[in-house]
Image (cartoon, helix red, strand yellow):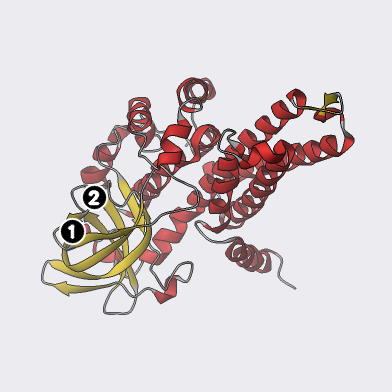
Amino acid sequence: MATDQALADEMVDAVRSWVDRDVIPNVAEFEQADEFPQAMFNQMCDFGLFGSTIPEEYGGLGLDITTYTRIIEELSRGFMSLAGLLNTHKIGATMIGRFGTDQQRQRFLPRMCDGSFRAAFSLSEPDAGSDTGALRCRAERDGDEWVVNGTKMWVTNGMRSSLVMLLARTPDDRITCFLVEKEPGESFEGITVSRKIDKLGYRGLETVEMSYVDHRVPHANVLGGDEGIGHGREYALSALELGRINVAARAVGVAQAAFDAAMAYSQQRETFGRPIFEHQAIQFKLAEMATKLQAARLMTYDAARRADAGQRVDMEAGMAKLFASEAAFEIASDALRIHGGNGYTTEFPVERYFRDTPLMIVGEGTSEIQKLVIARKLLERFPVE
């Protein structure tokens, strides 16, 4: 799916202008208080961002992955948590679009376009993060329903979501994805937000633990219908390829913000009678930051363009996520160093970039997991003959 380039540029420019005008000047009040940015969320709904990649036939914008990636980068440059509002929603829409039955696509996708019916993705558990084979949440068939019991961790948007893409183990010991419909809130008919997880960064949106006790899900809400039983893991991993491109784009956005802050500060702050940019040590540091940033952006865009071309991008997405997330942390760290003591205060935004960047290293598969994925794909692509 390709997006008209002029339309794509116009959409990205609109988001960029909004971020500069309304997000960056106001982000500190929401981030430091860990308060949901309702006004910013409302504007994202007005832009149509929650339906950005949903096909036009269902009421979405039908944007391609590359354009969506650029939008995520701009949002993250202003406030990385805004990208989090979208990412799990997009994973849900992608899974339904790719693997849902015709009836499921018709029933859910039109409702997911305006932001009033938001999705959360629920895979991780207290003892099962990247190890999807260790899931303990179970679903037992009872006539035309499934009864779900278990606990899920790290559910972004879990409290405010209306739909949860829930991965659970079925009696055949395979993993199935269930479309769990609920009302936004802390509890709903067998579903409880057991606790809100306080975080170092990535603040302003909720990340929660959710408990399921005899919660009933209609059989019609098994993703993919009868044929989807036991295929939840592969459905999730397929969607997470795009999720990792989005995490890489977040990393690029935060890294850009950190670099911009460091460049501006280095030309304004003076020591020994001259701007610190004129000191070679600072110049070298900024040159390295700019180079890492450019490499991360190109790797991320390359993975997105390959995905738009219909290619399998598990290795490229893993590479982009690995490099961009590590680069963002290094760039944010160097930006803090360039700011000196000021970088350690909440008066300057670099401390937020420093707190936000570790999420990209550990979220949606740690750097170590990405290396395993990359190594396995290398073996497939370069076998010994």
Q: Could you tell me if residue 305 is visible in this image?
A: no
Q: Give whichever of 309, 337 is nearer the camera.
A: 337
On the image, the x and y values in percent for residue 378 come to 68, 64
User: Could you say which is closer to the camera, residue 276 or residue 316?
Assistant: 276
Q: Which residue is mark 1?
A: 220
Residue identifier under label 2? 104
Q: Which quadrant of the figure has residue 174?
A: bottom left
Label 1's element? Answer: helix
Residue 293: give x, y in percent of width and height: 69, 40
Whether residue 311 sits left or right of residue 371 in the image: it is left
Count of numbered circles in the view:
2
Labels 1 & 2 near each other (Cβ < 8 A) = yes
Q: Amino acid at mark 2?
A: Gln
The residue sitting at the left extreme is 143
Q: Does residue 134 lie above or below 346 as drawn?
A: below
Whole-percent x, y for residue 107 in the image: 21, 45
Q: Residue 95, image x and y in percent?
A: 36, 52
Could you say which quadrant of the image residue 205 lies in?
Answer: top left
Which residue lies most toward the bottom here? 172
Q: Residue at x 58, y 55 (%)?
A: 361
Sequence order check: which comes first, mark 1 or mark 2? Answer: 2
Whether residue 291 can be seen here: yes
Looking at this view, name the residue that lies furthest to the right: 280
